[in-house]
Image (cartoon, rainbow, N blue to C red):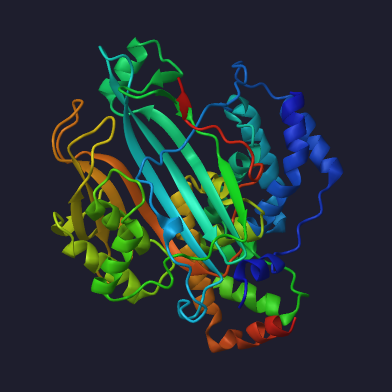
């Protein structure tokens, strides 16, 4: 049963013949009917865009390539990941800042020969709260707003959908890593030891391990990545943790280095205890900032699907693959 | 009006095919005609990519028709197809209406996930989850012994 959807397409019932006479007769009848006088307005809103991606740059490229004998068991045709991302950003004039939320869906179809990334899907930048919306409106509903404390501006409105194709992608860098937490910790610390980052070695190791939980690896490797995070200095065990959609899992949290907008926050990873698969990774405030209370997620990556699949990538139509895609973050 | 006529002529065959596969050929033309009548009345709401919106209207009309008619009267389909196709359709018919809808919007009506989500009034993410589950259930339905022959024929085709 190689491709169920293709076979299902072949089982489509025969399309009925169009009766041109009936079709034109109906059209003439319909357009002769009165309709509300309101002029049609196009719903197409060409706007700016982007994507959030404000996480930490990771040294994935430094990871050793897996040897031929350590591929995951029963190698899948594709690794399919569907995520929903949210990120908060403070924008506007320093005297009257407000918060906007960048939200978008991201999807990856990764195979050995080709990888597709669909990004900024259903993407949008909007004022975060009614109060933020009021401030944005008071500022004249600008289409772009300067980042507070930053050098860029944020485009407010819908994001532009993008599709990226990578031929002959790098092989899965996590596939050959140890499944023993102690060994895995040593390996990841070696890899992240000298990557030029200002972040602590502990945080870099945690980020890499968190990324490994989302990769196409064996279950024992995934569990080892989660277990090793628990052993890192400063990591806090969250125990049973509720997600916003009502689901719950077990989580860990590690203090995060400051960004140009936020200082007191931690990075949390919540996994499904039964499958070991990650459910959400998020940055959560540990101190109130910019009018946002403690425990506000300022970045969230919700994992909707992480699966091995044999179906062909489902890509949006009408989008130029590897075309220019505008980012919602632009130079000022 | 030119816009509407162009959309009408472009989308009519696909709306008709959708109506036929969901309500049967007997009601398909009437549902299609009513779909475009409603679309004309709501022309100011018609998005640039009108097909998902039109199929959403057609979907409501199909459901209304189903409430008034026995399901069997709606879905009689000529069957001079090969055994594998018949078996696949039979497996599909064992799924819930919601699962069938998710699968056929993609496989039969050629929509991409974003468009299918618009038809169903859900988010794309939700649609993907529903598609994933529906696919799994169809696969499970085909795993019963009744459908072994269908699978065998695919392997050899």
Q: How many marks?
A: 0
Q: Quarter of the image containing the N terminus of chain A?
A: bottom right
- Residue A112: percent from the left, percent from the top? 58, 67
* Residue A308 sits above or below residue A265 on the image: below
Query: A23 left or right of B114?
Result: right
Quarter of the image with the C terminus of chain A is top left
Nearer to the camera, A45 or B52? A45
Which is more toward the observer, A249 or A119? A119
Residue B84 quadrant = bottom right
Q: Position of residue B150 (x, y in %)?
A: 66, 83
* Residue A52 position within the rendered picture, expressed as x and y whole percent measured from the top left: 41, 38
Q: State the residue in front, B83 or A233.
A: A233
In this orientation, does residue B102 appear? yes
Judge left or right: residue A152 versus residue A309. Answer: left
Work out whether residue A278 can be spotted.
no
Tell me which residue sits at (39%, 74%) in the image.
A218
User: Which residue is pictured at 59% across the width and 16% down the height?
Assistant: A38
Rendered position, B154 above or below B2: below
Depth check: A262 or A245 in front?
Answer: A262
Q: Is residue A146 left or right of residue B134?
A: left
Above or below A175: residue A85:
above
Is A223 drawn above or below residue A233 in the view shown? below
**Residue A103 picture quarter:** top left
The extreme right residue here reads A21
Q: Position of residue A117 (x, y in %)?
A: 54, 51
């Amino acid at each position: 049963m190689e491709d169920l959807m293709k076979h299902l397409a072949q089982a489509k019932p025969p399309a009925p013949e169009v009766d041109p006479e009936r079709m034109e007769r109906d059209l003439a009848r319909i357009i002769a009917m009165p309709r509300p006088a309101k002029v049609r307005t196009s719903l197409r809103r060409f706007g700016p865009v982007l994507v959030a991606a404000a996480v930490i740059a990771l040294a994935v490229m430094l990871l050793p390539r897996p040897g031929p004998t350590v591929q995951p068991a029963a190698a899948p045709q594709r690794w399919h990941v569907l995520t929903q991302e949210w990120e908060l950003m403070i924008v506007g004039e320093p005297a009257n800042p407000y918060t906007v939320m960048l939200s978008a869906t991201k999807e990856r179809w990764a195979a050995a020969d080709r990888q597709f990334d669909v990004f900024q899907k259903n993407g949008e930048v909007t004022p975060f709260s009614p109060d933020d919306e009021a401030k944005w409106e008071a500022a004249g509903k600008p289409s772009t707003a300067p980042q507070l404390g930053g050098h860029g501006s944020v485009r407010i409105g819908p994001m532009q959908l993008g599709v990226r194709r990578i031929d002959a992608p790098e092989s899965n860098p996590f596939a050959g890593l140890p499944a023993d937490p102690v060994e895995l910790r040593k390996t990841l610390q070696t890899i992240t030891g000298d990557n030029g980052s200002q972040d602590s070695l502990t945080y870099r190791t945690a980020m890499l391990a968190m990324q490994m939980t989302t990769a196409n690896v064996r279950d024992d490797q995934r569990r080892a990545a989660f277990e090793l995070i628990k052993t890192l200095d400063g990591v806090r065990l969250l125990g049973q943790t509720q997600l916003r959609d009502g689901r719950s899992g077990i989580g860990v949290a590690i203090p995060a280095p400051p960004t140009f907008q936020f200082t007191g926050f931690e990075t949390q990873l919540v996994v499904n205890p039964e499958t070991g698969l990650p459910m959400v990774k998020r940055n959560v405030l540990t101190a109130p900032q910019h009018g946002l209370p403690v425990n506000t997620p300022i970045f969230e990556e919700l994992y909707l699907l992480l699966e091995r699949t044999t179906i062909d990538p489902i890509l949006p139509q009408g989008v130029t693959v590897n075309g220019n895609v505008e980012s919602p973050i632009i130079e000022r | 009006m030119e816009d509407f006529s162009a959309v009408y002529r472009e989308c009519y065959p696909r709306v008709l095919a959708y109506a036929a596969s969901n309500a049967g050929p007997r009601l398909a033309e009437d549902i299609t005609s009513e779909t475009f009548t409603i679309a004309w009345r709501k022309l100011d709401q018609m998005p640039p990519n009108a097909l998902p919106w039109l199929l959403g209207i057609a979907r409501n009309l199909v459901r209304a028709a189903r409430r008034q008619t026995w399901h069997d009267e709606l879905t009689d389909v000529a069957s001079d197809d090969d055994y594998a196709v018949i078996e696949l359709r039979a497996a599909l018919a064992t799924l819930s209406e919601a699962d069938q809808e998710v699968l056929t919007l993609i496989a039969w009506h050629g929509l991409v996930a974003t468009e299918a989500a618009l038809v169903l009034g859900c988010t794309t993410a939700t649609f993907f989850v529903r598609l994933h589950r529906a696919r799994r259930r169809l696969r499970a339905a085909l795993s019963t012994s009744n459908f072994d022959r269908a699978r065998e024929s695919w392997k050899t085709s």
